C-alpha cells in the first residue's frame, strides 16, 4: 500500500469512527431522556401545593403530558417528541391552533373607541380575559369579557390574550392584511397545547415552558431519580 492510498484509508477510517462516536452520543442522550418527569412542589419558593405537572417521554417517540391546577382543572395531552441538541420539541397534532383574523366590523360599534376585538374560546364561548398590546405591560387592558376596544394605540403588531384564571397566555400576531376598520376575532384555547413547543433538556432534568410561553422558574425531575 503506497502512502497516498494509506492516507485515504486512514481518513475514511477516522471519519467512520467519529461518525459512530457521534451517533452513539446522540443515541445515549435520547436513551437517557426516556422516562417520566414531574414537578416538585419544594423546588421553588411559595409553590402551589395544588399544582401538578408531569410529562412521560416514551421510547416510541410519543409523549403524554398531564397538568392539574387546583381541584378541578385538569389537562392531558398526547403527542410526539424529538430531541435537537438540548432542545426537546413537543408537538401534538390534535392541539388547538390559536387564531386571530380580520372580521367585518359590527354595524353598531363605536369607531371612535379604537380597535374592536372579539374573543372566544375554542368552543365559541365568551371568556374573561386581559390583553397586553405589543408586549408592553404598560398597555395592559384588564377585566375584559366578550368584546374589547383597544384605545390610544395607533400602531400595534400583536396582542397577548391572558385568561383571568391565568391558565392561558398567548401572543397572537395580527394579520398582515389589516383593513382600516381594524376589527378582529381571536379564538384561543384555554388548555395547554403543543405546537412544536421547545423545552430544554439539561443535566437529566427538563425546563418546561409555562402557559405564557416563557421558560418556567422550575424544572421537571425524572421520577426514577427522586428520593423515596
Image: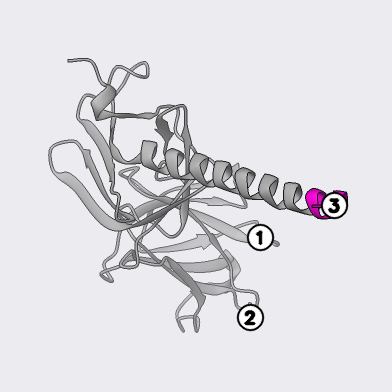
Q: Nearer the viewer, residue 23 or 204?
A: 23
Q: Position of residue 161 (x, y in %)?
A: 45, 54
Question: Which of the 4 image quadrants contains residue 137?
Answer: top right
- Proximity of marks 2 and 1: CB atoms separated by less than 8 Å: no
Q: Which residues are magenta?
A: 1-7
Residue at screen point 23% across, 15% down = 227
* Mark 3, other Cα within 10 Å: few <14 / some 14–19 / many ≥20: few
Overall secondary structure of the magenta stretch? helix
Q: Which residue is mark 2?
A: 179
Residue 14 vertical placement versus 128 (above, below): above
Q: Closer to us: mark 2 or mark 3?
A: 3
- Proximity of marks 2 and 3: CB atoms separated by less than 8 Å: no
Q: Which residue is mark 3?
A: 2
Disc number at residue 156? 1
Q: Secondary structure at mark 2?
A: loop
Q: Nearer the viewer, residue 4 or 57?
A: 4
Q: Position of residue 128 (x, y in %)?
A: 32, 53
Q: Secondary structure at mark 3?
A: loop
Q: Position of residue 115 (x, y in %)?
A: 57, 67
Reply yes or no: does residue 6 show up in magenta: yes
Residue 60 vertical placement versus 179 (above, below): above
As measured in the structure, the alpha-carbon distance from the residue carrying label 2 to the one carrying label 3 is 74 Å
Mark 2 vs mark 3: which is more N-terminal? 3
As measured in the structure, the alpha-carbon distance from the residue carrying label 3 to the one carrying label 1 is 70 Å
Mark 3 vs mark 1: which is more N-terminal? 3
Horizontal relation, residue 85 to residue 35: left or right? right
Most extreme residue toward the left is: 71
Amino acid at each position: 500500500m503506497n502512502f497516498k492510498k494509506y492516507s485515504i484509508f486512514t481518513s475514511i477510517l477516522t471519519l467512520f469512527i467519529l461518525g459512530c462516536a457521534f451517533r452513539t452520543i446522540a443515541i445515549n442522550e435520547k436513551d437517557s431522556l426516556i422516562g417520566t418527569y414531574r414537578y416538585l412542589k419544594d423546588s421553588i419558593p411559595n409553590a402551589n401545593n395544588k399544582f401538578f405537572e408531569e410529562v412521560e417521554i416514551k421510547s416510541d417517540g410519543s409523549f403524554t403530558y398531564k397538568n392539574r391546577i387546583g381541584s378541578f382543572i385538569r389537562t392531558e395531552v398526547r403527542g410526539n417528541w424529538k430531541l435537537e441538541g438540548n432542545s426537546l420539541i413537543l408537538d401534538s397534532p390534535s392541539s388547538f391552533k390559536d387564531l386571530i383574523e380580520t372580521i367585518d366590523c359590527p354595524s353598531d360599534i363605536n369607531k371612535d373607541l379604537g380597535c374592536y376585538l372579539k374573543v372566544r374560546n375554542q368552543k365559541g364561548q365568551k371568556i374573561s380575559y386581559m390583553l397586553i398590546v405589543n408586549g408592553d405591560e404598560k398597555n395592559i387592558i384588564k377585566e375584559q369579557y366578550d368584546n374589547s376596544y383597544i384605545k390610544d394605540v395607533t400602531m400595534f403588531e400583536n396582542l397577548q390574550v391572558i385568561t383571568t384564571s391565568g391558565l392561558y397566555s398567548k401572543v397572537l400576531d395580527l394579520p398582515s392584511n389589516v383593513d382600516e376598520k381594524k376589527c378582529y376575532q381571536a379564538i384561543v384555547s384555554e388548555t395547554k397545547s403543543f405546537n412544536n413547543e421547545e423545552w430544554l433538556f439539561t443535566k437529566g432534568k427538563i425546563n418546561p415552558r409555562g402557559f405564557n410561553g416563557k421558560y418556567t422558574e422550575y424544572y421537571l425531575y425524572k421520577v426514577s431519580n427522586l428520593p423515596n
